[in-house]
Image (cartoon, rainbow, N blue to C red):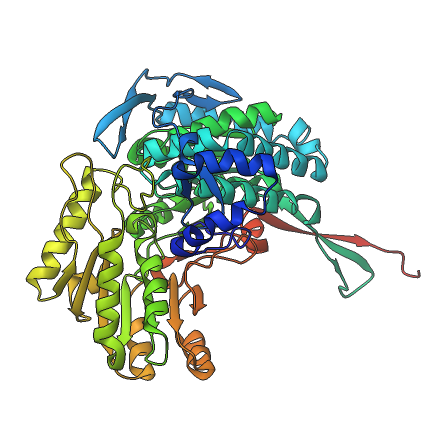
Amino acid sequence: MTPFSSTFPRTTVGTIAADKRRAINVLPAVAQAVLRKTLPRLDVCSQCVCFFPITMANPNPEIKCTKLFINNEFVDAVSGKTFPTINPSTGKTIVDVAEGDKADVELAVKAAKVAFERKSVWRQMDASARGKLLNKLADLMERDMHYLASLESLDNGKPYMNAVYDVYGSVSCLRYYAGWTDKICGDTVPSDGPHLTYTRKEPVGVVGQIIPWNYPMLMLAWKWGPALAAGCTIVMKPAEQTPLTALYLCSLVKEAGFPAGVVNMVPGYGPTAGNAIVMHPDIRKVAFTGSVEVGKLIMAGAAVNLKKVSLELGGKSPLVICDDVDVDEAAQIAYAGVFENMGQCCIAATRTFVQEGIYDAFVAKATELAKARKVGNPFGQGVQHGPQIDDTQFKKILGYIETGKKEGAKLQAGGVRSGSEGYFVEPTVFSNVTDEMTIAKEEIFGPVQSIIKFKTLDEVIERANATSFGLAAGIVTKDLNNALTFSNAVEAGSVWVNTYLAVSNQAPFGGYKQSGIGREMGKEGVELYLETKTVSIKLPSKV
């Protein structure tokens, strides 16, 4: 999973930095004067052409919401338990959060069921009114953009400007689905016999949603948006590593005017709160983004009442670099595709296949880019690369790096811890990687680029498909035939040509094989939350 919206096109940091002063010149004189005073402190979002004073970041935001959100109220867990959420930049506790479990999920589902009753305010609400509520929620998120971004950087570790971009992406997603609310339509069917037959698209009901820690706000928006557009009610569990922005967004749900019980949030651990959502007989659909291993458990648990399941799981995505391209440009595309979000991205292009004619030049450029990437405190000016999410992931990544070295891959850059505090790993590049190596087969979910040599397009297509994953793939080439051949042959839910990470609200996103079931985003995202009802009415024999 990754968050980019076509509303906010990606631009390289270097291009933005070069144009920063020129861009300011087009502003009104008063604005120019203010910005020129703050220019030394201006930072740039690495994904879009926006600039903000870095001083808007707050490394110590007030923590306003730490309890469960059930029936439009923040409440303690029934057990009274709490758990710590950790700052990955320091390894220290930020705050303790209420720990939900089965008893709390039961209360949340009860509230969601009441909100979904036939004569409830939510069910009787005009579809267009649901759209207005979603837009109001988006307005409130824009109002609190810098608070949300600061909270995300603190809890997740991503650089502040990337967190700002994530707020924009989340707002854009909610607005996209706000536009869908009154466009969900059935059909008139020309059925046999004297019948008027039509279909209705109706909300599934109470849905359970479980989101990951790598893009907390975006994954929330990807799931709230279509579910609420369809008219469902929600019980969500945020990742235990990153509950803070999800809980604060619940306060905005209430402020926006959503009826009680429509959105409920139960932070906690997977085996307790998550399992209770999956197993609950009154939840009619569960949506999950995360690991393949947990996805399989969810599939099994959902059998308790044959609830609908949609899964967005892992990847080991290939990016093929042909020898007809500009090496510097191709290396930039691959660099962005691998190191986005500290490599904690399910579509990361961690298998970088490079044609033998340009292999050495590409390795040299990739190494240069990785070494130049600025690692550090996510609130620091110009920082591009924050910490990994937690100690478990940190150790896992370093373990894979050691395995890569032992199996014969050549370490070109990084490969070690950065600093002495927190969970920072230097951007890492391996060359001389072969297909049978562990780092070429298993999802690392960290900043590790494996550069693999290939000879022909036919050969690399077979190698690219030789995996149990199929989430994304990419090719960089000037040859249209190569681009079309690869796009048609590769087994992946998203294929990008001469770009990467080009995910948008309007286009379906999901995977082949063990990378998932179903599609999020676009109209397909709404369909995940709908049932189709067929109605046939007998007509008079003569009309």
User: Residue at left 42%, top 21%?
Assistant: 65
Q: Is residue 428 visible?
A: yes
Name the spot of residue 265 as percent of width and height, x first.
Answer: 45, 29
Q: How many marks?
A: 0
In the image, taking residue 256 as reference, residue 49 lies left or right, namely: left
Q: Nearer the viewer, residue 11 or 405?
A: 11
Name the spot of residue 506 as percent of width and height, x first.
Answer: 57, 55
In the image, taking residue 306 as reference, residue 226 lies left or right, namely: right
User: Residue at left 37%, top 68%?
Assistant: 329
Q: Quadrant of residue 336?
A: bottom left
Name the spot of residue 519 as percent of width and height, x first.
Answer: 49, 55
345 shown above or below 104: below
Q: Nearer the viewer, residue 212 or 149?
A: 149
In the image, taking residue 37 as reference, residue 182 lies left or right, namely: right
User: Residue at left 21%, top 74%?
Assistant: 360
Q: Is residue 120 visible?
A: no
Quarter holding the C terminus is bottom right
